[in-house]
Image (cartoon, grey):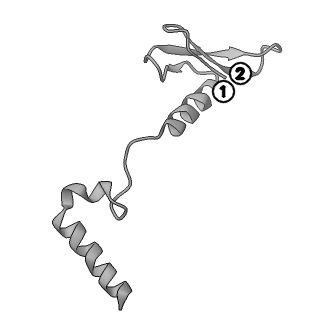
Amino acid sequence: MTALLDERKRELIVETRRGFASKTLFGAPSKRRSLDDEIVGVRNELVANRTVKCPVCGGAMAPTHGRAHDVVTGGRCRNCGSTLS
């Protein structure tokens, strides 16, 4: 009985507060990327030896190579100097 009442309360909340549906536990997930997703995406592009948009300033971030010069160890922004390793 309690579960049925709780379910009905959830339906009423979503129906009456459509503007808040995405901010509640029962709403749709946010379409924004998390910081972790952003950094992993940048790192994956750098490992593929591509220049990417710096997550700090939006400038060009180029891959940096290790001692063997064949392994990408991170990236460095040409604009602000931020590094990702």
* Residue marked by disc 1: 47
State the residue lying farthest toward the bottom. Answer: 1
Q: Which of 60 and 36 is in front in this view?
A: 36
Q: Which residue is drawn at 55% across and 18% down?
A: 51
* Image position, residue 32 (x, y; %): 39, 42
> In the rendered image, which residue does mark 2 sit on?
72
What's the residue at 44%, 41% (across, down)?
33
User: Dot 1: what SS?
Assistant: helix
Residue 29 lies, with reference to residue 32, above or below; the image says below
Q: Seen in the image, is 53 located left or right of residue 12?
A: right
Badge 2, how many Cα within 10 Å: few under 14, some, many 20+? some
Q: Does dot 2 land on a helix, a strand or a loop?
A: strand
* Residue at (48, 24) in percent of width and height: 55
User: Mark 1 near mark 2, Cβ–Cβ under 8 Å?
Assistant: yes
Q: In which quarter of the image is the N terminus?
A: bottom left
- Could you say which disc has been placed on residue 58 in the image? none
Question: Disc 1 residue type?
Answer: Val
Question: Can you say whether 29 is above or below 66 in the image?
Answer: below
Q: Which residue lies furthest to the right in this view?
A: 68
